Amino acid sequence: MKIADYTAVELSEQIKQGRVTVKEALDAVFEQIDCTEEAIHCYVTIDRERAYRQAQEVQKKIDAGELTGPLAGVPFAIKDNLCTEGMLTTCSSKILENFVPTYSAEAVKRLEAAGAVVIGKTNMDEFAMGSTTETSYFGITRNPRNTEHVPGGSSGGSAAAVAAGECFAALGSDTGGSIRQPASYCGVVGMKPTYGTVSRYGLIAYGSSLDQIGPLTKDVRDCAAILEVIAGEDKKDSTSMKREDTNFTEALVDDVKGMRIGIPRDYFGEGLDPEVKQAVLAAAKVLEERGALVEEFDLSLVEYAIPTYYTIAAAEASSNLERFDGVKYGYRAPVDDLHPMYKKTRSEGFGAEVKRRIMLGSFVLSSGYYDAYYLKALRVKALIKKAFDEAFAKYDVILGPVAPTTAPRLGESLADPIKMYLGDIYTISVNLAGLPGISIPCGTDSKGLPIGLQLIGDCFREKNLIRAAFTAEKALQEERR
Amino acid sequence: MANIIDDATIEYVGILAKLELTDEEKEQAKKDMGSMLDYIDKLGELDTTGVEPMSHVFPVQNVFREDVVTNGDAREQILANAPEEKDGMFVVPQTFPG
Amino acid sequence: MAKEYETVIGLEVHVELATKTKIFCGCSTQFGGAPNSHTCPVCTGMPGSLPVLNKQVVEYAVAVGLAANCKITQYCKFDRKNYFYPDNPQNYQISQLYLPICRDGYVEIETTDESGEACSKKIGIHEIHMEEDAGKLIHDDWEGCALVDYNRSGVPLIEIVSEPDMRSADEVIAYLEKLRLLIQYLGASDCKLQEGSMRADVNLSVRERGAREFGTRTEMKNLNSFRSIARAIEGERQRQIDLLESGEAVIQETRRWDDARETSYAMRSKEDAQDYRYFPDPDLVPVYIDDAWIERIRNSQPEFREAKRKRYREEYDIPDYDIEIITGSKHMADIFEATIACGAAPKKVSNWLMVETLRLLKEREEDPEDIAFSPEHLAKLIRLTEEKVINSTVAKEVFEEMFRADIDPEEYVTEKGLKMVSDDGALRSVVEEVIAANPQSVEDYRNGKEKAIGFLVGQTMKAMKGKADPGTVNALLKELL
């Protein structure tokens, strides 16, 4: 078996047993990068020197028996909206083209403490606003499965890097589907944990009440192992939660007997590609065959999730992105009058999609519109949360597609923003309700593009998800054979 | 399109958001914002009387720090990314009245 | 006949709280320090940083609210106030709009009614909210730029918003004095106007006497002393009356007071839309103050001025006037009580405070809050005079030194050799010399001119460099003559 074919957990095991060195693991990754990066463009920054330096230290600690966890020695890619000390962090935006943080995101710190080696920063939609990784200031990322197609977004670089073997695992962030949807398009596993499970400290905010960091991996086992490392309360993030049940790898059980799985009819209506529908329902069947109690139900309110989401996310983003003003860091336009400097800096520094959402967000918060738009959206959010609460009274897991279609062709989505926004219809309500969601591959369409299966759990019930996902993954592999 | 966004509104939002759009961008923004608002108006179909606006999804309260100094002098790090620095401070253009 | 106008004034008072650290990060609030040396990613608005609330800020805000008879908002939240300015690193200020921590209170002030009779009056407090202070902007007109120092950024403030209940500058000053004293007694702030730890914005309108509707108000900023507040009120009142008299309208606007020119000017700018787009800060969770917490704070409230006055009258034999002055400053009252606790007689302590202390404060243009000597030292000084180790002239000299540098009077007197010469022989020989050197005065005294002895005492004291007890010298002279 080639080093590049190992999963993260397998690789770490090989390293700990002395069969592979951390350096060899890095060599394998960089070899792959040299091969495919030019065509796919997963990364904004690759720092080989830092990686090899880190690898040396990690190897020493592994040899000394100080690092024994399942991620020790594993080369990682980090989405470029997570701060990395001493390494360029751009959010794929011109406005942060030269920003080198002096601190690391808490999630990155925890990964590194567990022996992960950061090799670089992955491309994304600018400030995580987009579903295709086409809005990056540093150029588009292509789908490794078919380079004429988008990898999805906004964590498109992370998903593509895992799919292309340009890293063993990656971190992404998910505000409305930004981990699950690219995972689905690229045929990898991606998980958005319950809101508050992973500290947001050092994650450059888009929609603070919706943002969560999560893993993109080759399989469910890697996903659980990474989540176990990065989850947990952080005193620096007031919204992070104290949780006792973060031993997620214990949920890697191939058994769904008696698990109640609900399939929302509302997720299978108009707009869903028939091939996607078929693959997802086939996966449900497989779980049913293994003892899960599967039934259809009406979730309701699905069509209201997108307008609710765009109101809240745009409003929060308009405020979160105010700090990018040319004063303290990042790009500054050379203008010698304060307010014109602000305007020129921000107009030149932000791309079209970011400006579009900032304008919308500023408007819905402005005097006279706050109640009608922003508060209304917060009320509908409460209703959506209630609909999920009712569903989870009956089911352990909700099963559906991740996206209505497989990865669109490059350039197709940006032309019509509303149509692009509609692509988020199955992922977005999960963020609004703070729920955990996972995307795992469940087949390919006639063009050979991957299809994703989404499993949604109740708050703090990642273990249900992991168990269902692990079982489905095993079963689908068997079916394929 | 039900929501007509006029030039004055785009101008005003530009002041709030500190964005200066080209004429072309303005036209596009008027269209985009109008159609987004039409889309958002769909929320009006729902009766939300008596529903509390939900800003936090979980009822977490009282997350505090104790009043203890934990940070030392980090001015070098803080200024490390400054576009322009002088005497340990960030340099910004003056505001001209206007 | 000229119309009679009534002035209607409401105040927004900002008070910097006496916490050790900032409101949302662990940076020191200490004054001074090199620019930006008390900063971190949180209080400089670095990307990815997050706020965590300092509990002490809530404690102080509730304490002030209770002292000002407010209702405590048991479930309160923080909101973002969005506006661009370089002293505000995130370009939003975290404040409270929708659910401020205290509401509906009042304080009582002493004023005069329409017939000039003394009376007390309640000034309503609309609300008190918690918020963060801004950094400092230093204008460099020479270079045409401004420099930003974020050391004050994130220092906790409470803003106390009064009802428009005041009708004159005198009432405003009385209200401010009252607030200042309450807050100083609570130890929640030192409330120094000059240093900016207490700042007032004045909302003022005029209307014809007897009118029911309020006139259009203006808001006046940049008032940093009681004197400038009084002058700004008078100036603005006159400006508004002049406008109305000439048939013009008062425009609702924010004006900046220029104390040197004794005039105000409008702070108008196209870029300043005054539309702050407040919305609940998603990075902070709500604060819930339960009954037990409120009771705990209520029970630990200090003895306020009224109670102290009463107790002093009962316990100490000092004049009412002294009591007024001493209890007029919490700091002075603390020193008074602590000195007594060191064993000094109340009357003596009061004398030192009323005479020498007030004289030196006046000379140095300082407030009682600036008194820096320790009660132990004052007690020692009093003991030294009582035990006739030094005389009153020397004591004053020592006190000045103590006031300046808080020296230990005992050590100082020993070091400088200021103890009175109690050696009878040494004193006797000096007196003999003085008698021999001043035959004319001796003659006068012997001829019944009692006053002449005064001159001889003076000469002896001079020769002794003050280190003698004038009473002893007097007796010795009489004996030898």
Image: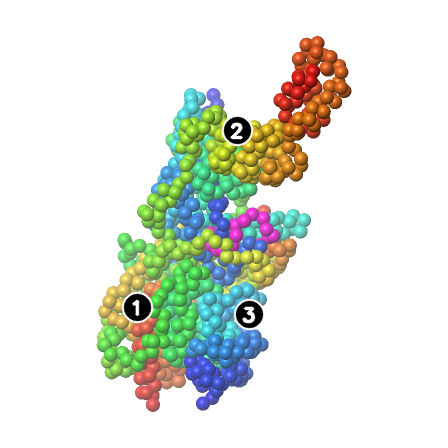
Whether residue C13 is visible here, answered yes or no, is yes
Which of label 1 and label 2 is nearer to you?
A: 2
Residue situated in front as seen by the camera: A202 or B95: A202
Secondary structure category for the residue under label 3: loop
Rendering quarter of residue A326: bottom right
Q: Amino acid at mark 1?
A: Asp
Residue at (64% x, 32% y) in the render = C419
Which of label 2 and label 3 is nearer to you?
A: 2
Q: Amino acid at mark 2?
A: Lys
Secondary structure category for the residue under label 1: loop
Q: Is residue C157 above or below residue A331?
A: above
Which of the image's four quarters has the N terminus of chain A? bottom left
Residue situated in front as seen by the camera: A245 or A17: A17
Colouring mode (rainbow / by chain / secondary structure / one colour): rainbow
- Location of mark 3 (residue): A87
Secondary structure category for the residue under label 2: helix
Q: Is residue A14 above or below residue C105?
A: below
Residue situated in front as seen by the camera: A448 or C413: C413
